[in-house]
Image (spheres, helix red, strand yellow):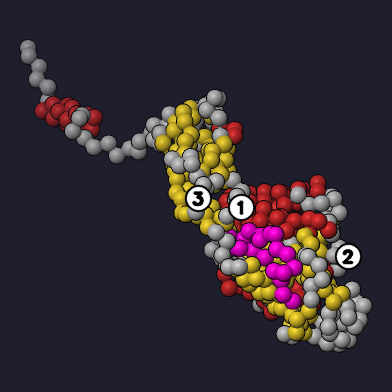
């Protein structure tokens, strides 16, 4: 007897066959994400501008970090520059003689800007690897090479020997070009000194900080607010740059480390012990996202004014925004007054999305200098310029004042080095 399959079961079987074909056959769409590339490279930074470099100067090399962020080793096949005439490459730890980069490992390439003639130059740094998703990764490079033109003169600090009247005045003066590099080689005939418009003779050629070896006290105020720390590279590069400065201090120099965010605190008081200073720089700091900039810089100026070393400075790294919790107590004018009362120049370094007006005024009104670091990668070069200025190339001018007891005057120092010139003014009372 022949048995027939019920119609219900037959339809069900047909439906299942159709479903299987429809889901797995060639005509269906697969919306599942592609498998991640097990070989991935992260390169930082992806672009860099060496800025304006003036004739005779060389900027600090750029460190390019190459990291294996995948799950398999990567072969670094080649690292090359498109313009080897004006940019130089040091493979450092990324040498292709040992091209395998293990999982999680990082190597560093150093790129220098070494132009052979004046002009604007661009180049690509290309890293070739066996990564399927990014076999070539490029870093855009730029640099500008110019003759020195615009001069910025700052009277950083003024000291009187107190032999009144006719006190001997010592003025610590910086002369920078448009790239922020110290201008050296100036003699007494390049300087003019005036008190309320009356010329005062400069009896001898100026001395350099490096020659006289006068010890320095410098306080660092470092911004750890949310707008800075949201980019982890900011913190790492800031700490590395300050550490490099500390390592170049002389045996008799001393430094202090102040950190600030919602709170501000001296994390290491003045000391010549570089180990203590380096430990303080790299110590963790997280006390909120706000910014007590003015409080921190005022504290730094007060602390520095009380030191006995003849040369003094405050260096602050920040985006320039003062945003404390609650109602602000300290103002920008308070910061400037405190610094000027103690005779302390404030050197400001703007990092990230900066408040230019605030930082420029803080520096200019205290005898300091403003530096712009568009990215944290620029901090190394800025700090090296500060090292060159404060530890080596600061001019020291000594003259006899014509002011009597209780007299004040506008001290004007002019620099004339044809075809370039500049001047600065600072209010002084040598015999209060």
- Eye-nearest disc, 3 or 2: 3
Give the Cα separation between the discs numbered 1 and 2.
34 Å
Looking at the image, residue 414 sits to the left or right of residue 165; the answer is: left
Residue range (magenta): 175-193
**In this figure, which residue is indicated by the disc labeled 2?**
308
**In this figure, which residue is indicated by the disc labeled 1?**
57
The front one of 428 and 281 is 428
The front one of 426 and 48 is 426
Circle 2 Cα neighbour tier, 10 Å, few/some/many (<14 / 14–19 / ≥20)? few
**Dividing the picture into quarters, in which one does residue 356 lie?**
bottom right
Residue located farthest toward the left when viewing the structure as drawn? 1
Q: Is residue 93 above or below residue 278?
A: above
Per the image, label 3 sits on a secondary structure element best described as loop
Compare marks 1 and 3 and give the one earlier in the sequence.
1
- Mark 3 touches mark 2? (CB < 8 Å): no
Image point 66% across, 60% down: which residue? Answer: 182
- Mark 1 touches mark 3? (CB < 8 Å): no
Circle 1 Cα neighbour tier, 10 Å, few/some/many (<14 / 14–19 / ≥20)? few
Residue located farthest toward the top when viewing the structure as drawn? 1
**In this figure, which residue is indicated by the disc labeled 3?**
117
Q: Is residue 189 magenta?
A: yes
Give the Cα separation between the discs numbered 1 and 3.
13 Å
Q: Is residue 101 magenta?
A: no
Quarter in which the N terminus is drawn: top left
Image point 67% across, 53% down: which residue? Answer: 384
Q: Is residue 307 above or below residue 377?
A: below
Q: Position of residue 36 (x, y in %)?
A: 41, 35
Per the image, label 1 sits on a secondary structure element best described as loop
Quarter in which the C terminus is drawn: bottom right
Looking at the image, residue 141 sits to the left or right of residue 93; the answer is: left
Per the image, label 2 sits on a secondary structure element best described as loop
**Dividing the picture into quarters, in which one does residue 4 lie?**
top left
């Amino acid at each position: 007897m022949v048995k027939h399959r019920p119609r219900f079961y037959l339809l069900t079987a047909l439906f299942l066959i159709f479903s299987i074909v429809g889901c797995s056959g060639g005509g269906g769409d697969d919306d599942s994400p592609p498998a991640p590339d097990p070989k991935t490279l992260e390169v930082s930074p992806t672009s860099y501008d060496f800025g304006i470099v003036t004739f005779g100067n060389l900027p600090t090399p750029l460190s390019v970090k190459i990291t294996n962020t995948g799950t398999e080793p990567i072969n670094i096949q080649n690292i090359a520059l498109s313009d080897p005439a004006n940019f130089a490459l040091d493979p450092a730890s990324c040498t292709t003689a040992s091209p395998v980069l293990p999982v999680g490992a990082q190597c560093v390439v150093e790129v220098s800007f070494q132009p052979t003639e004046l002009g604007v130059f661009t180049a690509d740094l290309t890293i070739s690897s066996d990564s399927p998703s990014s076999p070539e990764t490029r870093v855009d490079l730029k640099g500008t090479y110019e003759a020195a033109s615009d001069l910025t003169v700052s009277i950083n600090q003024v000291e009187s020997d107190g032999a009144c009247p006719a006190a001997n005045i010592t003025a610590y003066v910086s002369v920078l070009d448009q790239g922020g590099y110290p201008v050296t080689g100036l003699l007494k005939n390049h300087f003019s000194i005036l008190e309320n418009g009356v010329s005062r003779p400069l009896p001898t050629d100026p001395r350099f900080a490096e020659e006289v070896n006068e010890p320095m006290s410098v306080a660092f105020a470092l911004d750890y607010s949310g707008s800075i720390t949201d980019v982890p590279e900011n913190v790492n590069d800031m700490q590395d740059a300050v550490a490099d400065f500390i390592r170049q201090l002389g045996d008799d120099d001393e430094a202090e480390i102040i950190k600030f965010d919602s709170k501000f605190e001296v994390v290491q008081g003045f000391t010549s012990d570089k180990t203590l200073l380096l430990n303080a720089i790299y110590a963790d700091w997280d006390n909120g996202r706000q910014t007590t900039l003015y409080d921190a810089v005022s504290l730094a100026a007060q602390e520095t004014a009380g030191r006995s070393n003849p040369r003094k400075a405050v260096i602050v790294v920040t985006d320039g925004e003062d945003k404390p919790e609650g109602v602000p107590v300290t103002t920008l004018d308070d910061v400037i007054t405190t610094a000027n009362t103690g005779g302390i120049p404030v050197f400001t370094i703007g990092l990230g999305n900066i408040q230019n007006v605030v930082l420029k005024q803080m520096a200019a009104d205290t005898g300091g200098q403003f530096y712009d670091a568009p990215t944290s990668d620029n901090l190394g070069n800025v700090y090296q310029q500060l090292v060159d200025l404060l530890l080596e190339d600061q001019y020291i001018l000594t003259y006899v004042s014509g002011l009597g007891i209780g007299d004040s005057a506008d001290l004007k120092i002019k620099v004339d080095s044809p075809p370039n010139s500049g001047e600065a003014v600072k209010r002084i009372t040598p015999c209060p």
